[in-house]
Amino acid sequence: MNRKDAVVTVNATAKQYHEITNKRKLRLPIGKALFEKGAKVDVYCPQGGSFQQLVVKKFIVLKNHVLVEFCK
């Protein structure tokens, strides 16, 4: 996995990392530039040293955040 291709990098706790990678969903603030299908998101957990790069399947812009769903 190449970390340079990612549009957004997310640092998460161990619990958040587990939820993101299993449920394949993430809420981001409105300011993040992620508005294209197929964009890549890096999820990193410094506690466990875990890293995963996920590909955006679809996203929904809501009132105060963006709900992102990843490919399985």
Image (cartoon, rainbow, N blue to C red):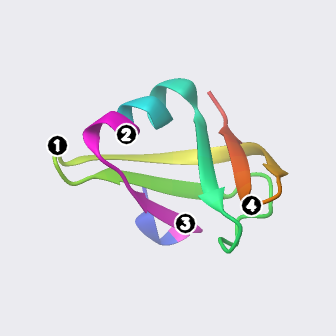
The numbered dot on residue 17 is: 2
Q: Distance between the residues labelled 1 and 3?
A: 20 Å
Pointer 4 or 1: first along the chain: 1
Relative side of 29 to 1, left or right: right
Specify the quadrant of the image occupied by residue 65. Answer: bottom right
Q: Are marks 3 and 2 in contact (CB under 8 Å)?
A: no
For the residues labelled 4 and 2, say whether their Cβ atoms are less than 8 Å apart. no
Q: What residue is shown at x 80% (from left), y 60% (from top)? A: 36
Residue kind at label 2, given as amino acid type: Tyr
Q: Which of marks 2 and 1 is nearer the N terminus?
A: 2
Where disc 1 sits, the SS reads: loop
Q: Can residue 58 be seen in this view?
A: yes
In the rendered image, residue 68, in percent from the top left (x then y), is placed at: 69, 46
Contact flag, marks 4 and 1 (Cβ < 8 Å): no
Q: Which secondary structure lies at badge 3?
A: strand
For residue 8, the mark is: 3
Looking at the rendered structure, the secondary structure element under dot 2 is helix
Horizontal placement of 10 versus 48: left or right?
right
How far is disc 4 from disc 3 in space, using C-alphas?
Answer: 18 Å
Out of 66 and 3, give the one closest to the viewer.
Answer: 66
Foreground label between 4 and 2 = 4
Q: Residue tagged by mark 1? A: 48
Amino acid tagged 1: Gly
- Checking the image for residue 19, the label placed there is none
Determine the CA span between mark 4 and mark 2. Answer: 22 Å
The boundaries of the magenta stretch are: 5-16
User: Taking 5 as reference, is 48 above or below it?
Assistant: above
The amino acid type found where label 3 is placed reads Val
Q: Is residue 58 magenta?
A: no
Q: Which one is earlier in the sequence, the residue at label 4 or at label 3?
A: 3
